Image (tube, rainbow, N blue to C red):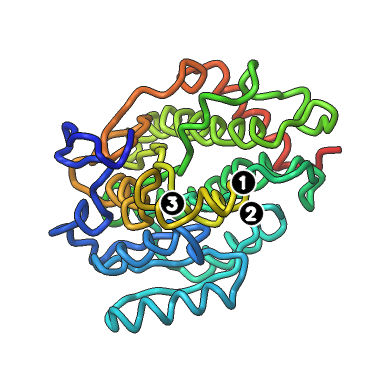
Amino acid sequence: MGIFSKRGASGFSASSTAEQVTQGVDGTGLTAIVTGASSGIGVETARVLALRGVHVVMAVRNMNAGTDVREEILKENSNAKIDVMELDLSSMASVRKFAAEYNSKGLPLNILINNAGVMATPFKFSQDNIELQFATNHLGHFLLTNRLLETMKRTSRESSTEGRIVNVASLGHKFGYREGIRFDDINNESRHNKYRAYNQSKLANILHANELARRLKIKQEEGVEITANSLHPGEICTNLVRSIHSCFQCSLVYNRILLKWIMQGAATTCFVSLHPQVKGVTGEYFSGCNIIEPSSQAKDEDMAKKLWEFSLSLTDRKYY
């Protein structure tokens, strides 16, 4: 879905910007966590949500960069409610520390945007001895979501407001390993391909959201209204893309013609997180601010359930 695509059923398209898709939406009284909010589409997501009145907590690995972004947002919007907290998704200890500190603050949590990620990195282990891309892009967010879920449930019950969990995935989920998730070979360096490993982690993002949506539907009878969806933001020339493309490809011409501006790249995230059209929608995959079909593997319920149990086993103990 390119930047010149037609408007879909939502009235928006891949060329719509984050400000356009949230125009007129009032987020006052809502609180959101945005991971990876110190660069790329995370910055624009945080800026636009704050512009719409949402209290935004930027969860970032680099606190200096996060503080700089916060100051820039406040220069533009002095009324913005925005905080910065440290989070390294490649470290389970950091994820647990972040969640514990957030929960101890007594803040509500209406929106959780699992946005941060690394892309096509050479084979490397995380601090917990797990392949870095799978650890950062999926497991870190899986653990974070689980650790914050009770706060989201409480917020939903007490405010009678729907909570939303949003996983930023990628169209690349269609081009991973043949078997989808390599449950038995996550740490096999000899079979590692950095591009397919990235795509595997993005498939995991979708499967995670789908299984979470299934589990949360059961909780609706208990007064918990929380949705979980995933999305493809589009091809955007952020630091992630620059890490694998040549200087020529990331030239101004390439940016303008082939890749979406960051303000467009954050649009689907902001739409799914905040727009009234998405109320009650769960377990779906979006692109260009519209629901689209992911790959058949991304819809595999058995794989989603297996990934859930696999992820629980890895986040409960170290994996060697």
Q: Residue tagged by mark 2?
A: 89
At 56% across and 23% down in the image, what residue appears? 305
Q: Is residue 165 above or below residue 69?
A: above
Quarter of the picture containing the C terminus is top right
Q: CA distance from mark 1 to mark 2?
A: 21 Å
What kind of element bears circle 3? strand
Q: Residue tagged by mark 1?
A: 244
At 46% across and 74% down in the image, what residue appears? 69
Amino acid type indicated by mark 3 = Ile
Amino acid type indicated by mark 1 = Ile
Q: Residue tagged by mark 3?
A: 113
Q: Is residue 219 above or below residue 24?
A: above
Query: Looking at the picture, how far across and down is residue 45, in whole percent?
Result: 37, 59
- Relative to 265, is 92 on the left or the right? right
Q: Is residue 176 above or below residue 54?
A: above
Dot 1 or dot 3: first in sequence order is: 3
Query: Looking at the picture, how far across and down is residue 180, in whole percent?
Result: 61, 21
- Relative to 20, is 296 on the left or the right? right
Amino acid type indicated by mark 2 = Leu
Q: Nearer the viewer, mark 1 or mark 3?
A: 1
- Front residue of 253 and 292: 253
Counting labels gives: 3
- Relative to 281, is 309 on the left or the right? right
What kind of element bears circle 1? loop
At 60% across and 68% down in the image, what residue appears? 86
At 28% across and 55% down in the image, what residue appears? 18
- Front residue of 208 and 293: 293
